[in-house]
Amino acid sequence: MNASDRLAAYRSMRDFGTTPEPSGDTAAPSTGGLRFVVQRHRATALHYDLRFEMDGVLASWAVPKGPTLDPSVRRMAIHVEDHPIEYVDFEGVIPHGEYGGGDVIVWDRGTWVPHDTDDPVAAVAKGDLHADMYGEKLRGRLVLVRRGPAKEKEQWLLLHKHDDHAVDGWDPEDHPRSVISGRTNEEVKADPAYLWRSDRPAQDAVEVVVGAASGPSDDELAALDRLGDDGTWTVFGRELAVTHLDKELFPGRAGEDPVTKRELLAYTARVAPVVLPYVRDRAMNLHRYPDGATRKGFWQKALPHHAPDWVGRWDNSDADAGETRTYLVVDEPAALVWAANFGALEWHPWTSPTDAPDRPSYALFDIDPGERTTWEETLELARLHRAAFEQLGVRGVPKVTGSRGIQVWVPVRRGPTYDETRAWVERVSRTIGKLAPGQVSWKWRKTERQGRARLDFTQNAVGKTLVAPYSPRPAPGAPVSMPIGWQELDDPTLRPDGWTIRTTAARLDEHGDLFSGALVHDQRLAEFR
């Protein structure tokens, strides 16, 4: 039976004009082994959906109490209809009244290896499946055994073997957050930001819905407009003492007015809900220009003492004497507006989360043009990256910097160290550089590069950062570091500073958040060696 036939039951139960679930019309290519996913699903009753990739679909079981690492516990599991491979990425809200209506998070995900069989479909038909799990939460061997004869909605028994990964007393309810968004079911229900885009290739189909996180209301923006040069602005439920609102922070481009602080704050409030997933739970380095973009700025790493109590923060216990210990963490939109209010024109989150500061969740590729590098040469280098990632089976998410260059973020599963990530990026970068030897220099000092571009793999280090998507840059017109689609590298109108804080809203309205593929941390560096 082919995959399409195996999905007939799944499709017959759903109206894909209503539910955001994938239809299975486009199969996501498998790289690096068979995949599994566990979704925590609050429908009529809370349960966990355990799904294994096999024979082009996800064989699926509903587990009311969820899988566990405790080998003394036996769980009931109900064998349900096969689901499409694309379901490994599905997180969101199935509308009330639809089959399975309720909120869904990707509770765990990873790869698995069938044990004692090279035909897992036959093992399921026989009623005895042994699976070695390589997830973020589930590790070690799970066993599924059918109870009674084969039939529709048949009952199975799920258990974890006594092995090195077994943990007595382990309860899935003690680990309630999504492994791709960090959110709980309740947070997804309140803010269903993830949407499956069936009009995109499978590897790019998960999108953060622009506006799903509430932006500032029209009344809040109008209140900012009504303020004098100073005042108190209530936005996102927080009261901010805003100052010097009429100060010109960015000179205007030809034929345009300068950009004021009032305009910067309004822009920041509008994009803060979109930026938030990229900066949440991460230390933030700020490039401050309190006197405007025409004056010299400076880096602000330490959280200022005047920061209000509600602003998020993180204490780096590994900081040496004289190093920054307490950092800003933008865990709510108002915190980003607060940072912009005291002159933060650029926003640079760490590439590792605060709960694992030595384990990056992004591999960073930075195409840094030299003085002699033309824009067309920069585009050529970016196209070489595109080809390399296609060859390797890597999902990289590009953006123009808002200055002169192009950057690519590659989301990775937690595991590799910064040294390992940097070594992998260096290996890929040097391979790309060999294809453009006259354009690339590997010299550290800018003065020694003879005006050539640098593929800067050294940004993959603790505390080093690249500018966040949608962050302004300190240049005339307030250009923005804007996510792009890979196909836009072939658009002759593309420019590295082509979008500003005045044009970003229209871009988001038209295309959505093109960077949202960076939020799905499902790739392992080991798969690309």
Image (spheres, grey):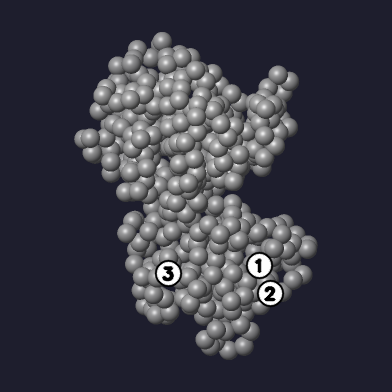
The residue singled out by tag 1 in the image is: 67
Q: Quadrant of residue 372?
A: top left
Q: Circle 2 sits in a helix, a strand or a loop, which is it?
A: strand
Return the residue found at the far left: 492
Q: Compared with residue 153, is residue 520 higher up or lower down, i.e. above or below?
A: above
Task: State yes or no: discs 1 and 3 in contact (Cβ < 8 Å).
Answer: no
SS type, badge 3:
loop
Asked if the residue at tag 2 contacts the one at tag 3, i.e. Cβ–Cβ closer than 8 Å, the answer is: no
Which amino acid, by three-letter code, is at mark 2?
Arg
The circle on residue 483 is none
The residue singled out by tag 2 in the image is: 75
Q: Earlier in the sequence, mark 1 or mark 3?
A: 3
Q: Residues within 10 Å of mark 3 (few under 14, many from 20)?
A: many
Q: Earlier in the sequence, mark 1 or mark 2?
A: 1
**C-alpha separation, residue under disc 3 versus residue under disc 2:** 29 Å
Residue drawn at (67%, 34%) of the image: 308
Question: Which residue in the structure is indicated by mark 3?
Answer: 19
Contact? badges 1 and 2 (CB < 8 Å): yes
Considering the numbered disc 1 on the image, is that residue within a helix, a strand or a loop?
Answer: loop
Residue 407 seen anywhere in this rendered image of the structure: no
Residue 445 in the figure: left or right of residue 370: right
Q: Position of residue 503 (x, y in %)?
A: 33, 37
| Residue 274 spot, x, y in % from top left | 47, 45
Mark closer to the chain start, 3 or 2: 3
Which image quadrant is residue 184 in?
A: bottom right
